[in-house]
Image: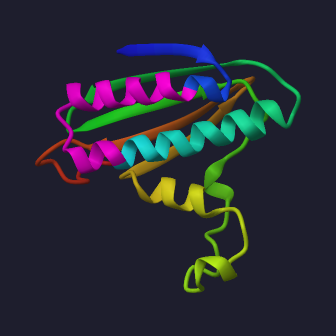
Amino acid sequence: MDRLTVPGTLQSLAHITEFVVHMAAAANLEPRVTYRLRLAVDEIVTNIITHGYDRAGQRGEITIWAQVEGQHLIVCVEDQGVSYDPRQVSPPDDLDRPLDKRKAGGLGVYLALGNVDQFRYEQDEDCNRSIFIVSRPGCGARGLQ
């Protein structure tokens, strides 16, 4: 299992992106799947930094690890910021409206969760885990539980 720990700041996003792209290549993911995974992780990590740390007046680290398990690449982001379960965000109710007529907010999380085969959120004690699961080539979304 490969692991990276960085400060929970926006300046760390480039390192996290490099890590995700490297792990996706190691898992032989298709470019489109890699791109979507990178966007999903970037959106959730940005929310962790801005909402879980900065707006709460906290500082902390973000640890990201990844591993291949059979037909899937699993990427896990761990933080100690304010707990925030992205699955609890309601999908925007105005997706059919022109962009300039829509309410701000919520679209990034909606798109992030839709870009992976499965997303899980766990919180125990002082650790939040955002877990992204994508299928490897030729495997489809089979075998997800």
Q: Nearer the viewer, residue 39 or 69?
A: 39
Q: Is 125 on the left or on the right of 143, as rendered?
A: right
Q: Is residue 17 magenta?
A: yes
Q: Residue at x 67, y 34 (%)?
A: 123
- Determine the residue located farthest toward the front in the rendered image: 100
Which residue in the rendered view is the most extreme toward the left?
Answer: 138
Place residue 49 in its image quadrant: top right
Highlighted range, magenta = 13-35
Depth order, front residue of 60/103: 103
Q: Residue furthest right?
A: 57
Asked whether, in this view, residue 33 is left or right of residue 97, the answer is left
Which residue is at the front of the view, 121 or 41? 41
Give left or right: position of 122 versus 116.
Answer: right
Image coordinates for residue 4, horizontal then vertical, percent: 48, 14
Q: Residue at x 26, y 53 (%)?
A: 141
- Residue 139 image point, x, y percent: 15, 48
Q: Is residue 83 visible from the viewing direction of this image? A: no
User: Is residue 34 shown in magenta?
Assistant: yes
Q: Main secondary structure of the magenta part?
A: helix
**12 w.r.t. 4: above or below:** below
Q: Is residue 13 visible?
A: yes
- Residue at the image point whose x is 55% and y is 85% from the top: 96
The N terminus, quarter of image? top left
- Left or right, residue 130 beside residue 128: left
